[in-house]
Amino acid sequence: MKFLKSGSMIVACIFFSGGVIAQGQKPLTINELIGIALESSPQVLAARDQSRAIKGQLSSARAIPNPEFELNTGQQRSASGPLTFGTVSSWSVTQPLDMPYTRYPRVNAAEANVRAVDAGRVAFEIEIISRVQQRFYELMRREAELSAAEEDLGLTKQIRDRMQIRYDVGETARFELIRVQTEFLNAQINAESSKLRVEQAKGLLRQVVGHALPPNYEVVSQVLKMEPLPSLSILLSELHMQSPDLKRAKAEVEATESKLSFEQNSRLPRLSIKAQQYNDPNFTDRLYGLVVSIPIWDFKGGQIAEAEANASRAKNQFNAQSQGLEQQLESAYQLYQMTSYQVKILDQEVVQLASSARRIAEVSYRYGERGLLEYLDAQRTFRVARNDLIKARFDLASVVTEIQRLRATPEWVAKIEGGM
């Protein structure tokens, strides 16, 4: 019995300590969520590994060719005259010359590949930041909807309780009580649905951030402050200057052009310096010379044709990438203008008018000037307008996040470089 009691106490202590840890967990800000995503995502870590691997290829491209050493030894025997024996030996050293017309294109191609891979890594990490922000704003929206649904539930409950009292004393008909009870049940269903949507949004955010984020995490609510964006022409110029996708495509064009130059220059003779010495019992020969490799049979026709096709393909891909990003930015900016106008109208006019109509209907209902149905209709109209405003605000935040991803906001790039 003492053992069972001790075991029960240990289990209770474990559950208690786990509950304390869960309750004492610090809510995470959006910047902390982004940091966790960038440091724990296997895709991000793989992209960084690839960047380091390409830098190793650059080191290999810059390396000077190694010399070749040859050493021979043997016995000498005369074929005529007195029979004589002796030891002979020879050695030679050949140093290939890294000619500038092949070295510079080779190194330039490797450097361009490094820039392309690094730009691809930055583009991928910016996309991760965008996904985290999108899911974070989605969670903020669902929490705002839950808060509004709980407020509606509390107000509807008050109306139902008041109507129940009036029905019990015979001041109202059963039809109005049933109508209020129906509204209360609808508000209750909406509140429960909002709770489920909050949990779904948290699950989607954890899926983007990674499983390094605990399942029972909490976030710090952030008030949306959308600053006005510059004009479309400025955004397009920033896109061409800052977009890592375009930088990657441009670097790939430079790499293929350098590869083409390398293949074309490979048709020129390759040179090597050679020194050799021959020793026998009677004399020593020292020779110095130049080794020339002349492309007589293989004139690099196939390699040059392939490099030309790759260079043309890279240029076409760069143009297609530029046009595609411009179209995406123009579409996002149009949606931004439309959503901004929608938020402005809903916030400054529709919601305020619906709120005023609800207050007037409530006062009129209390003084008996309006019926319950009119008050409930006014309440429902306000609820729809408020929910539309919540949705429009977070749709605007989503659009702004997409524009920031396309223009490669410098603050995001700073976060990426700081995380490295």
Image (spheres, rainbow, N blue to C red):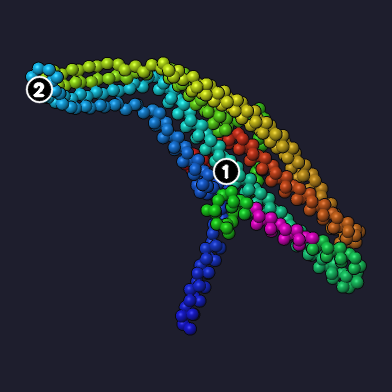
Residue 257 visible, this orientation: no
Q: Between marks 1 and 2, how big is the CA–CA gap?
A: 82 Å
Residue where numbered disc 2 is placed: 84
In this picture, residue 418 sits left or right of residue 381: left
Q: Position of residue 170 (x, y in %)?
A: 91, 72
**Is 163 above or below relative to 296?**
below
Occupied quadrant, residue 377:
bottom right
Of the residues shown, which amino acid type is indicated by label 2? Answer: Thr
Q: Position of residue 3 (x, y in %)?
A: 46, 80
Magenta part of the protein: which range? 186-201
Mark nearer the N terminus (1 vs 2): 2
Q: Position of residue 48 (x, y in %)?
A: 48, 40
Q: Residues within 10 Å of mark 1 (few under 14, many from 20)?
A: many
Residue extending farthest to the front is: 80
Front-most of 95 and 360? 95
Q: Is residue 199 magenta?
A: yes
In this picture, residue 138 sits left or right of residue 116: right
Q: Is residue 102 magenta?
A: no
Q: Position of residue 254 (x, y in %)?
A: 51, 25
| Secondary element at tag 2 | loop
Q: Residues within 10 Å of mark 2 (few under 14, many from 20)?
A: few
In percent of the image, x 54 and y 31: which residue is there? 248
Q: Main secondary structure of the magenta part?
A: helix
Residue where numbered disc 1 is placed: 128
- Report the number of discs: 2
Front-most of 332 and 375? 332
Of the residues shown, which amino acid type is indicated by label 1? Answer: Ile
| Secondary element at tag 1 | helix
Occupied quadrant, residue 238:
top right
| Res 233 label | none
In percent of the image, x 86 and y 66: which residue is there? 178
